[in-house]
Amino acid sequence: MTNTTTQIEASFGAARKLFNAPAASIAIATRKAWESFQEHVQWRPGEVHLISNMDEESVLLLDKSLPMCDQIVGIGGGAAMDMAKYLAWTRQCRLILVPAIVSCDAMLTNTVAVRVNGIVRYFGNKFPDEVLVDYGLIQKAPKELNRAGVCDIASIHTALHDWRLARDQIGEKYSEEIASEALKCLTKLDANADEIYNVSPKGIDTIVDLSSAEVDFCTRFGCSRPEEGSEHIVAYNMEYLTGRHIIHGELVGLGIFMMSRLQGNGEDWILDIMKRTGLRYQCLEATPEEIRQCLLTLKNYGKMAKLFYSVLDSRPITEEFVDEALKALYS
Ligand SMILES: [Zn+2]
């Protein structure tokens, strides 16, 4: 199923379109995003709910406590987008998303990532009716949060490698056509790295366009295999082990750094792209010891969480690999 129903409007002031919204709107936002949004647009919904995470408990509780409404408006990053999507799905109402950062593709997909006992699970089926990409609002956020938005494009590099391994070693379904579309996204990322680094309107458009292309080919293929490989296992295991919320882009950046090395797959090339786009990959919110533990438990975590086949099934992560990789990470 391809998403042809979402209208994306990108401009300075796009969020002002909310003034045409029906009266019974409920806004879902993170605290920081709501403060920034209020300074930028003076629109007020009937109700506002500030959220902090997407744990199963929080999601179910909020869903139960909120009334029916005509429209849900999600304002913020991935968690606010996902919560808004979930609530609009259970209410079967209109959904408008206003990204305060273009930090991940949650604003373009129909599924909702919920953390169930610390493990990510996907629920729901609701594409946004409108996405209002307001350059002015997005540029108010710290630049590094927006640069983090390229993580699910950069991850194509390691994900495609894992996907080919799965095709060759266990005969997993593979599509040459989709793989080549995904590779084109990587090339565009490379070509527009400077604009992304500067979070210019062209840089924001590039992130949105590439995310949109990526969501489209993943939806046509039926899952996120073309952009989700072992680098995402690193991200999920880091969340699981630390129990802290760390920006998805920084976790995936770390995963790309580590897994491209394990794969022996153009690690310098992709590192150069991460540096030029400003995608952080050192995950400084985690200690070296936490990263070490994450790598050493990675294969078992992948098995426990019943994730996909990857380089982890064909190459061991040894103490020597971890020592060498950590040294390179901080050099
Ligand atoms: Zn991701």
Image (cartoon, helix red, strand yellow):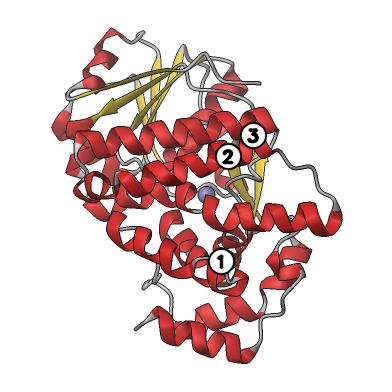
Question: Residue 92, which numbered label?
Answer: none
Give amino acid for label 1: Asn
Question: Residue 265, which numbered label?
Answer: 1
Residue 75: quadrant of the picture = top left
The reply to whether residue 64 is in sight is no
Crowdedness of circle 3 by 10 Å Cα count: few (<14), some, many (20+)? few
Looking at marks 1 and 2 on the same chain, the residue that comes earlier in the sequence is marked by 2
Give amino acid for label 2: Ser
Q: Are marks 1 and 2 in contact (CB under 8 Å)?
A: no
Residue 192: quadrant of the picture = top left
Q: Quadrant of the N terminus?
A: top right
Alpha-carbon distance for marks 1 and 2? 17 Å
**Callout 3: SS:** helix
Q: Is residue 215 left or right of residue 116?
A: left
Q: Position of residue 196 (x, y in %)?
A: 27, 46
Q: Position of residue 30 (x, y in %)?
A: 35, 43
